[in-house]
């Protein structure tokens, strides 16, 4: 699939379900904890410095953000969960927005869930994994921050992620470093296969 990743443009921030885009283009939804480096993963994928805003404080993505990638698919950046220092009311609003998005499996073509390779997935990660699973859409797990581990620690860390999320043989787990670019080609190829 030939997609020009340089032709990426921000389309809109959906603040409520009525803003969700439903035009038939495939939607690849990115989700992850607030401080897991989701924006950095997106920027690395597109080879763009500040395409998805990288916040010094976690929790900068507060809407469902749509980016059109070369007219081929939407990259959908979902609100980060779990950490951000915001009011409970604001967190609840994000939660409802996410629930509304996941309640519409017809919108979702492929899920990309980002976890931190250095830590055991949290309860929130397990919930998010289940939300993706319940939609029935294919899902790729990206274990980010690979550059922060010693080589000898990688296998055990990946196994802990597999065990905690109870990944099956069919579940893809891609070790990734937004910092160094490791895993980029593998993730792109998994995304392109998932939307063809």
Image: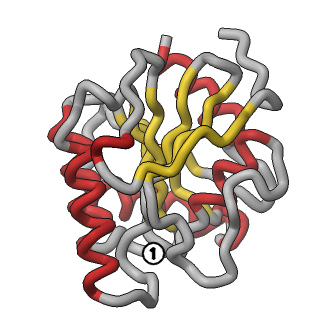
Camera-nearest residue between 112 and 97:
97
Q: Is residue 31 visible?
A: no
Q: In which image quadrant can residue 139 be found?
A: top left
Would you place residue 1 above or below residue 27 in this image? above
Residue 20, image x, y percentages: 37, 39
Mark 1 sits on what residue?
Answer: 119
Left or right: 54, with 36 as reference point: right
Q: How many discs mark residues in the rendered view?
A: 1
Q: Secondary structure at mark 1?
A: loop
Question: Compared to 79, does 113 lie above or below?
Answer: above
The residue at 45%/59% (across/down) is 63
Viewport quadrant of the N terminus: top right
Dividing the picture into quadrants, the one containing residue 102 is top left
Q: Nearer the viewer, residue 188 or 47?
A: 47
Q: Is residue 170 visible?
A: yes
Q: Position of residue 107 (x, y in %)?
A: 32, 29
Residue at screen point 60% across, 65% down? 37
Please provide percent x and percent y for residue 52: 68, 55
- Of residue 123 and residue 61, the one placed in the foreground of this image is 61
Q: Is residue 142 left or right of residue 151?
A: left
């Amino acid at each position: 699939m030939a997609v020009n990743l340089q032709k990426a443009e921000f389309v809109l921030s959906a603040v409520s379900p009525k803003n969700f885009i439903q035009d038939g283009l495939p939607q690849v939804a990115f989700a992850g904890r607030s401080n897991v480096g989701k924006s950095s993963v997106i920027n690395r994928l597109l080879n763009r410095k500040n395409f998805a805003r990288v916040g010094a404080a976690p929790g900068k993505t507060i809407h469902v953000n749509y980016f059109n990638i070369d007219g081929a698919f939407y990259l959908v950046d979902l609100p980060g969960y779990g950490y951000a220092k915001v009011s409970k009311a604001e967190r609840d609003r994000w939660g409802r927005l996410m629930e509304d998005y996941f309640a519409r499996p017809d919108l979702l073509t492929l899920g990309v869930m980002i976890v931190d390779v250095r830590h055991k997935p949290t309860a929130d990660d397990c919930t998010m994994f289940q939300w993706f699973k319940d939609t029935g859409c294919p899902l790729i797990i990206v274990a980010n921050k690979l550059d922060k581990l010693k080589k000898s620690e990688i296998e055990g860390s990946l196994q802990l992620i597999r065990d905690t999320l109870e990944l099956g043989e069919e579940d893809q787990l891609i070790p990734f470093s937004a910092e160094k670019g490791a895993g980029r080609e593998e993730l792109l190829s998994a995304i392109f296969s998932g939307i063809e």
